[in-house]
Amino acid sequence: MISPEDVAAWLMASHTEEQKGVKDYDKLLERIKGAPEYSHIRSVLKKIIRDEKRHVKMLGSLYSER
């Protein structure tokens, strides 16, 4: 089973040839479609996206308070 940490590491390691060209989550999901871990990775990516949106909102509110 692939852990969320594995997915994050995969996303961050975009310098390798195998991962070159993966610019967003949709492209990543398209490339791994049919893999046994697809649904797990998809749920992890949704959580990452949700967390990113929340963090952007938090940073925006902190910035606007200054």
Image (cartoon, rainbow, N blue to C red):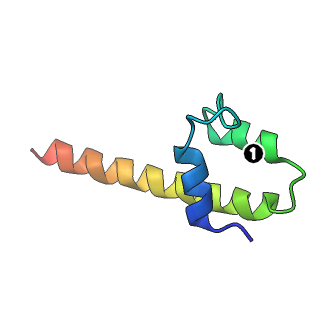
Q: Secondary structure at mark 1?
A: helix
What residue appears at the point 28 percent right and 45 percent down from the top-left corner?
60
What residue appears at the point 61 percent right and 50 percent down from the top-left corner?
10
Asked whether 60 or 16 is in front, the reply is 16
What residue appears at the point 79 percent right and 61 percent down from the top-left corner?
39
What residue appears at the point 24 percent right and 49 percent down from the top-left corner?
61
Residue 11 in the image, given as x and y percentages of width and height: 58, 46
Q: Which residue is mark 1?
A: 29
Q: Quadrant of residue 5?
A: bottom right
Asked whether 5 or 65 is in front, the reply is 5
Residue 54 in the image, given as x and y percentages of width and height: 41, 55
3 above or below 34? below
Q: Callout 1, which amino acid?
A: Leu
Q: In the image, 60: left or right of 34?
A: left
Q: Is residue 46 visible?
A: no
Q: In the image, 51: left or right of 15?
A: left
Residue 65 in the image, given as x and y percentages of width and height: 13, 48
